Amino acid sequence: MRNMDDIAIGAAFCACVLIPISPVLAVDADIATALAWQIALDRSGFSPGVIDGSAGAKTFRAVREFQQARGLAVTGQFDSATSVALGVDTANVLTRYTVTPQDIAAVGPFPNDWNRKAQLKRLDYESLEALLGERFHCTVALLRSLNGGGSLANLREGETITVPSVSEAPACRAARLEINLDEKIVRAFDGAGRQVGMLHCSVAANQSDLPRGESRIVVISHNPTYMFDPAKWPEVKNVRRKLLIPPGPRNPVGLCWIGLSIPSYGIHGTPQPEMIGKTGSHGCIRLTNWDAIRLSKMVEVGAPVKFVSALQRSSTRTTPSAKRRQFD
């Protein structure tokens, strides 16, 4: 039986009415091609990062990973064999979406002050643009460019916009994870050792905060709360005690927490998808909210997680030096 958190997440990401349209009505051929490949990679579980209509380093990295996983020639390019294997569809990259009452209701106050955040029941989306970007796995800039270039923050219920035609194939089961801290990539493998997914992530900038060695998954939580500890956030000056931060997409660990056996470390979502692929977390492994949710469907509690880093090979420690409560 599915729990209420699963139902809520499913509603947030899947409850939408989509009408296919021709991409040539809205974008030029180069953007349509990049979108088609990014959408296909995203659907396959080999993430191109946040969809933006521009074929950059993350997109081509995902192409190479998919090619290698499927036994194709590893060209790192948009070639015909890979296009067929991925099911790239350049004729249907865009669709129309109608704003619903649920969308409007999912936008709420988002104070900057941590004390005020702790007083809320839920940290909803700060804007309708943020909600739509997350739902369609894309940048706000792309959404604006597909809809005349202006802000979409003031859309009303019943208004219709153009969005990427994203969808999600059934998640493959993953028996183990390997996280390359240098490349900022999470790789998923099945029980036979075949790679079944690749996700871009963010990691800590400070080497001493990075997890090391081998771990395992001990808990999977949807819509998690977050324990804010001011001792771990020296940049925050006005908080004197620990605060329980409510769940929601703007929670520091996003919509999903995959806790590890290394105390207080986990793989989780983020309210800042544009930061994925960069350093900047306090130690945990950050994914986009949609990739974190996808990964939670692929793995089970007990699955091993191995951390790989050429910079850490000379170290024999298997846990970070600093003890911490749940870090982001």
Image: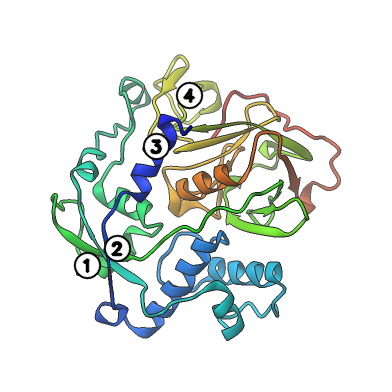
Label pair 1/2, CB-CB below 8 angstroms = yes
Farthest-out residue, front: 1
Q: CA distance from mark 4 to mark 1?
A: 38 Å
According to the picture, the residue beneath numbered tag 2 turns out to be: 143
Q: Amino acid at mark 3?
A: Ile
Residue 147's label in the rendered image is: 1
According to the picture, the residue beneath numbered tag 4 turns out to be: 228
User: Does residue 237 sit above or below 251 in this rendering?
Assistant: above
Q: Amino acid at mark 1?
A: Asn
Q: Amino acid at mark 4?
A: Phe
Label pair 1/3, CB-CB below 8 angstroms = no
Label pair 4/1, CB-CB below 8 angstroms = no
Q: CA distance from mark 1 to mark 3?
A: 30 Å
- Badge 3 local density, few (<14 within 10 Å), some, or many (20+)? few
x%, y% of residue 135?
A: 36, 52
Q: Secondary structure at mark 3?
A: helix
- Badge 2 local density, few (<14 within 10 Å), some, or many (20+)? many
User: Does residue 56 sit above or below 24 in this rendering?
Assistant: above
Q: Secondary structure at mark 4?
A: strand
Whether residue 249 can be seen here: no
Looking at the rendered image, the disc whose residue lies closer to the viewer, 4 or 1, is 1
Residue 96's label in the rendered image is: none
> Along the polypeptide, which appears first: circle 4 or circle 3?
3
